Amino acid sequence: MIELDDRLRILQRAAREWATELRSHALEVDRDPDAVMRLLDVPVIRGSGTLQIPPEYNPHPLVLSGERFYMMSALERVVALEECAWGDASLMLAAPGAPMAGIVVAALGDEEQKERFFGRLLERLTWACFALSEPARGSDAMAMTTTLTPATGGGFTLNGGKRYVGNAVRAQLAVVFARAGKGPTGLKAVLVDTSASGFKAEPVPTLGLRGAQLGAITLTDLEVSDEQVLGRHLSSTRAGLWAWLRTFNVLRPTVASMGVGMAQAAVDYVRAHRRQLTSHERDMIDTMDRQINAVRHLTRRSAIAVDANLSDGYIASAAKVRASRIAEDVTMRALDFFGPAARLEHPLLEKLARDVRGIEYMEGTTNVQRLSLFNLLARTSNAGRGMGSGTAQGGRPEFGGSSVT
Amino acid sequence: MTTAKVPEHVDLGGPPDWFREAARQHGYGGALASLHQEAGADTLLCGPSGYAVASAETADRARRWRAAGTVADRAVGQESRSTTVPLQALGLVAIRCAPLPPASPSEYVPWALRLTWLRLGLSGALLDACMEYLGGRTTGGEPMLRQQLLKGALADTVIAHLEAETVLTGGGATLPELADVNCHITRTDRELLRLLGASGFTLDGPGRTAYVSEVLADAYIGPTGTDAYIGPTGSGVSL
C-alpha cells in the first residue's frame, strides 16, 4: 500500500474542497456543457487554467500551507484528480487549461514554443485541446491519415480530420498529431491556433462526461510554420512515437485516478442516501470500498513508477484497466442499492454510471492496455520470447484515446 | 380516478418474442410503443416502481395507466415526471403514473417477459452494430475481426444471448429469473460498448440504444434480488 506524505495530504485536502464546489455544478453542466462558461469565476475552474505548467514557466504555482504545487508529476495529478473526479469529472475536464496538450509541449517543445504556449495559459484563460484520434481509425498511430506536408515557399500544410477531442470547440490552442512521413519517426505534433484559417471544430454530443464536450475537427489546408512543429530541435527518433508514448504514460495514471474517484463517489452516495442497510448490504459496501482502495494504491504505484521513469508505463496500463472496470462495476452496483427506477430518481448516481464509461476510451482502451501488458510478459518470460511486438509500450504503436483493441 | 382490477389472464396479442425481432430490426421506438399498446388503447404500461417510459408522443396520447393488476385513468396532477439528459435528448419521458402497485407478481410476468425479449433484441442490434463497426476497421493493416481478443468478446455475447433466449423461450420464467436475464443483458451490452470505442459513447451512436435499454430495465424490472422499492429518500417500501 502506498500512503501519502504530509505534502500530498495537503494537496488532497485542498482537492476535496474543490471537489465539493465541482459537485454543486455537476448536474447543471451535464444538462448544458456550455454552463462552464458561466462558472469561470468559480475558483477551482479559474485556477485550473494555470495548473500543470512546468516550474520554469510558472512563477505563480499553487501554494498550499507553504507548499508549492506545479501538478506536473503524475503522483500530484493522481492525488488531486481523484478528489476532483469524486466531485465531478465532467466539469473538471471542461475547465480551461492544457492538462494533456501541456504534457506534449513540455516534452517536445523548444524553449520558444514552451514560453509562447505556457505564457498564453498564464496570460488569460485558455483551453488547449489534444487532437489525436481520427474517424474510423481511433488512435492507431500507424493508420493516421492527417498529413503535414511541406508547403511551397516554406512551412507546412495540415490536412485531415480528428474526432473525440475534448474541449475541441472551446479551445484556442490545439496540439494536433499528423503524419509527415512513413513509420514511427514520421509522426509529428504541431501547435495550432484554432482561429487560423482551415481549422473547424464541431461538438460531438456524448452520453456521459458531457462537460468535456468532445468535438470533431476538420483541418483544411491549414498553414503551419516551422515554429509550430513540436520537437523540431530533437532527433526524429526522440520527436517521434517513442517520445509520445512516454507522454501518454504520464496521463494513464491520471485517467485511472478519475475512475477511482468516480467509483468512490458512487459508494459514498449509497452511504449517504440509503438510511436502512442490512448487514449484508453493509458488507457489500465495505467490499466495494476495499476493491476501490486496491485500485487506488495500484494507481498511486503506477504514478510513482512513471515519475521515476517515463518509460515505465506498464503499471499505469494495469491501473487504467482496473480503474475503468471498478468504476463501471461499482456505479452499476450502487444503482442496484436503490431498486427499480434508481436511474430516474437518483440523478447524480445515474450521471456517474454514464460518466464512468468515458474512462474506458481515454488513453487507450482496456484491450490496448492488455496487449501492452502481454507484450511485457512475452519479453520477460522465457516461454514468451519473440511473441510480443517491440515499441516503447510494447504493443502496436497506438496512443490511446478511442481505439478499440 | 377509476380503477379496475385486470383479469388474471389477459390476451396480450402476439407472441412475446415478436418484440425481440422488432427491436433488433427497428430499434426501441416501435417495440416500446407496441408494449404500451398491448397494455391497452391509449394506455401507459408502468413498472413496479410506478414509472412508465415512453416516447413523448405516446405519453401525450395516453389517458390511462396500467400496472400489475390495475388499470386507472391518469391523474396528471398527481403524476411526477423524471428525466435524464439522454432520455430528454432522445424524445423519451419517464412518468410515474401509478402509486406503488400491490404485489401481484404473477400478473406482471407477461409484461416483464415482453420487455426482456425487447431488450434482448436491442442487445442483438448492438451486436450487429459492433460487427459492422469492427468489420470495417483494420489495425496494423489487419482486419480487427481477426483479433482473438475481439473474437472472444463477441463470442461471449453470443453465449449470453443464447442463455437468455433459453430462459425466455417456452414460458415459465419467474420474475427473479427475468431480473437475472436482464442483469445479464445489461452486463453484456456494457461489454459490447467497450468494443465500439468512443463511437459507443456518442449520443447519436449505438450507445444510445444500450442506454435506453438500461433505463427500461431499471423502470420495468429492477435489479436482481431487489424486493423493495427504495425511493429518493432512501427508505424502502416492500412491493
Image: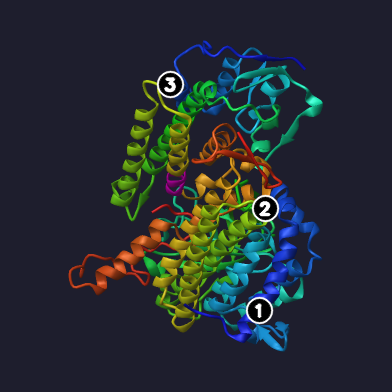
Subunit that carries the residue with mark 2: A
Image x and y of residue A365, in percent: 44, 57
**Residue topped by disc 3:** B17
Q: Residue at x 76, y 75 (%)?
A: A123
Query: Which residue is more in the foreground, B123 or B216?
Result: B216
Q: Main SS of the magenta segment? A: helix
The answer as to whether the residues below labels 3 and 2 share one chain is no
Reply yes or no: does residue A228 show up in magenta. Answer: no
Three-letter code, disc 3:
Asp
3 vs 2, front mark: 2
> Which circle's residue, 1 or 2, is located before the other in the chain?
1
Labelled disc at residue B180: none
Determine whether the residue tagged by mark 1 lies in a helix, strand or loop.
helix
Q: Residue at x 53, y 26 (%)?
A: B105
**Residue topped by disc 1:** A11
Label 3, residues with CA under 10 Å away: few <14, some 14-19, many ≥20? some
Residue B188 visible? The answer is: yes
**Residue topped by disc 2:** A273
Three-letter code, disc 2:
His
Subunit that carries the residue with mark 3: B
Do residues under tags 3 and 2 come within 8 Å of each other at their CB atoms? no
Residue B226 sits above or below residue B172 on the image: below
Label 1, residues with CA under 10 Å away: few <14, some 14-19, many ≥20? many
In the image, the segment drawn in magenta is: B190-196
Determine whether the residue tagged by mark 3 lies in a helix, strand or loop.
loop
Q: CA distance from mark 3 to mark 2?
A: 38 Å
Image x and y of residue A25, in percent: 75, 57
Q: CA distance from mark 1 to mark 2?
A: 28 Å
